Amino acid sequence: MGPLKVEEGVSWALAEHRAMTVSEVHYEYVIRVPRDPAAQVRGDVAIEFLWSDRAGEVVVIDFKDPSDRVIDIRANGLGVDWTARHDHVVLPAFAMRSGKRNRIEVEFVAGDEALNRNDDFLYTLFVPDRAHFSLPLFDQPNLKARFSLTLEVPEGWAALANGEATVVSGDEGSTIYQFAETAPISSYLFAFAVGEFRVEVAERAGRVLRMFHRETDTEKVARNRETIFDLHGRALDWLEDYTGIAYPFGKFDFALIPPFQYGGMEHPGAIFYREEGLMLEESATQAQQMGRASLIAHETAHMWFGDLVTMNWFDDVWTKEVFANFMASKIVQPSFPEVNHQLRFLLAHHDSAYGVDRSAGANPIRQPLENLNEAGTLYGPIIYQKAPIIMRQLERLVGQERFRDGLREYLHVFRYGNATWPELIEILDRQSNMDLAAWSAVWVEEPGRPVVAAHMATDESEHLDQLSVTQLDPDNKGRQWPQQLEILLAYDEEDIRFPLMLDGRTSFVDAVAGRPLPNFILPNATGLEYGRFQLDPRSLDYLIASLPSIPDPLTRGIGWVTLWDGVLNAEVPVSDWMELVLAGLITEELEQNTERILGYLETTYWRLLTDDTRRLLAPRIEELLWSGIASSGPQTLKAAYFRAWRSIVQTDDGVERMRRLWNREQAIKGVPLSVGDFTSLAAGLALREVDEAESILDEQVARIDNPDRLARFVFVRPALSRNPLVREQWFESLRDSINREREPWVLQGLTYLHHPLHAADSSRFVRPSLELLQEIQRTGDIFFPTAWLDATLGGHNSVEVAELVRQFLESLPPDYPARLQGKIHQSADMLFRSSAIVGRIES
Ligand SMILES: [Zn+2]
């Protein structure tokens, strides 16, 4: 090991050095939060740890802008001559006691960067390396530590953190909370939230669960409360049973935070969620209800997968995400007995994973990481959607019970510690006859997907002679992806299925000789298979003509997903596809499929049609969707039709109906509209540039009484303006990172700004948005760069904007971060494809 270089951010070299020289870390924080969100948050910390470094290197503590923020430092009771280097406090070795416990005391001003300060509440969000943006500590996942915390907050404020709280009396005007010391946890999992919160308490299976929230609509709380607690209770029970390990972190609280950056964050004992994901509107769809259950199961699963056993470094962050999603899909099943779960898995994963893997920016599941300040770019659909598919395939290869036993061993061996992916594969390898390391090398370490196709050979009597399935590497690198397939041969009277291991370039299905030609063949008939399944011409023709009439709902779902892939690969003409979608809506009987078809309809309508075609089809589609509301049975399905209708409306009659609904002159039987629905209607009317748009928006402001929702609407409103200058000013305001702090608000505003109806005007914001991306990555949270790109590019389909993005990509300097460049390719992929499709139709 060479001499320690102290560079910006937490580098792998620094982390490695510290992991070898520092251990048994304990933090004792005292943090004082003032009522005024502009006043400084101050604190003290005592960091105790065992230190032994034969090389006698300096000790490095991570803390952003230390020269401005450190008030005083003492090492082992004495003043110390420390230096500030980048975002680190560097202490000389001579101030330390080798082979012994050391105690560093720091008095500091906390950085606001990761504190998410609002008028009457504050919450931390430290993943992946942002703890040191606010607090001094060793900010790396494999230096697990026990945290003690004392918070002094304004009187009347609630507080939660990882440990159990005790209230001790504060000075006049303040309340002091003391939190019990945590079990060993990683720095990114340390968390607290304070402020005006209401607290709901419930008990499930002898366990006390507490929900902190800011919802003022008591009916909404009452409607959601029991389900939210039930879902947590069931997830906890299920996980204890599956893992054989009792919930490892004592108490269980969670907080619903309106502007939270993403769906949820798994702080042990204190999960944070974005409020709208859990507090559903009365008009929620089935997909939203299942989404909530999955989110809760996902975060709860992290208590074991991620919190109890943590990746050694963020290059393996996917291991915690894959298990959270993998477990979630098992956990939610009993809560939705009416749902087809095999189909649900397919619909929840394949489309989004394919969305990245078909792009030029596709990334492997596991990616190297030199410095934690780039960890944010590792996240995306490959981790969240592709990895769970691969894990289900692995489970199928190893066998369910052995797979579970392997996971139990992994959790037990590495509990309260850290592990790498190869360490898990080694455990699972012992449970299996397959060479899992080789399997992992292509599925986990390589980007992309195989092109898989079935080939039929017929004899002279037009019967099957031979059936083979081949795989090709789309990049011609000779890679082969071993996977278990199920081949479906569909006939009018029956379906025949064959298992097939595709472990080389070509595999043959025996026992088909002499059978008549099937209507169609699917090589991905369980819905777990992964690849670009290129249908043979006969199967393609049959599905385009008759997909809605296939009796089995899972097979229909697979057909939809496979054809959509074909549309985007220009193998299925958009006009045929659109007719199929409309026909599918009329006959589809399963709500899950209907919701997906509605999603395809919206995307096709806004992105794959020319303006002329869209206007031509609008009356028919609006009518179909509107009548779908009335003819649907379940309220959730009515709501799904209503949402799709609201998104698509373009005719004068449709817009007028929208206005009457917003004005409460008309109601929809079976779809109770919430404040959120009225806000969406008002926004929709403004985007359609109705004459009285401004007064509608004014009136909508007056109708919103919840302060969080009001602040959000006021923030996004300029993006809805009819005046291009106001929209431009709003966009320009985003150059200041202060105005980007509430990320969900920014994303909603961008979606309005780049709505297809305004796309021609908003194309001028595309290049500046791309130019801001690196800064967005530096200042924003982990999902923000991708979400920023998606919201910016998601409304466009013109050749001009596609060209503009291509030019931007070509103009990038060689040192532009490769992964960020990949993200642009991923986000722009749909733009590239849709502009090519639309461009072909137009020319
Ligand atoms: Zn997660």
Image (cartoon, rainbow, N blue to C red):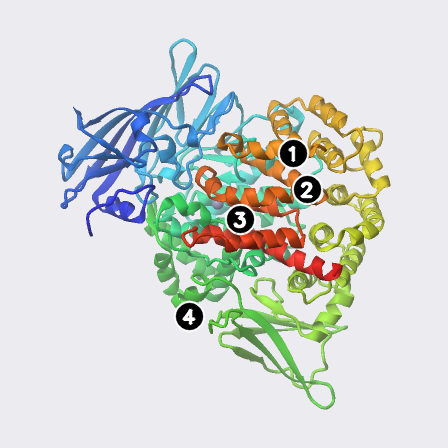
Q: Which mark is residue 761?
A: 2
Q: Foreground mark, 2 or 4?
A: 2
**Cα distance in 3D space between marks 1 and 2:** 10 Å
Mark 2 to mark 3 CA distance (whole Å): 42 Å
Dot 2 lies on which element?
Answer: helix
Question: Which kind of residue does numbered mark 2 sit on?
Answer: Asp
Q: Label 4's element?
A: loop
* Left or right, residue 601 beside residue 168: right
Q: Earlier in the sequence, mark 2 or mark 3?
A: 3
Q: Secondary structure at mark 3?
A: helix
- Disc 3 designates what residue? 328
Identity, as a three-letter code, of the amino acid under mark 3:
Ala
Which residue matches tag 4? Answer: 434
Front-lying residue, 750 or 498: 750
- Measuring 54% from the left and 41% from the top, which residue is drawn there? 296
Please name the residue that numbered disc 1 is placed on.
Answer: 727
User: Which of the two discs, 4 and 3, labels the residue nearer the N terminus?
Assistant: 3
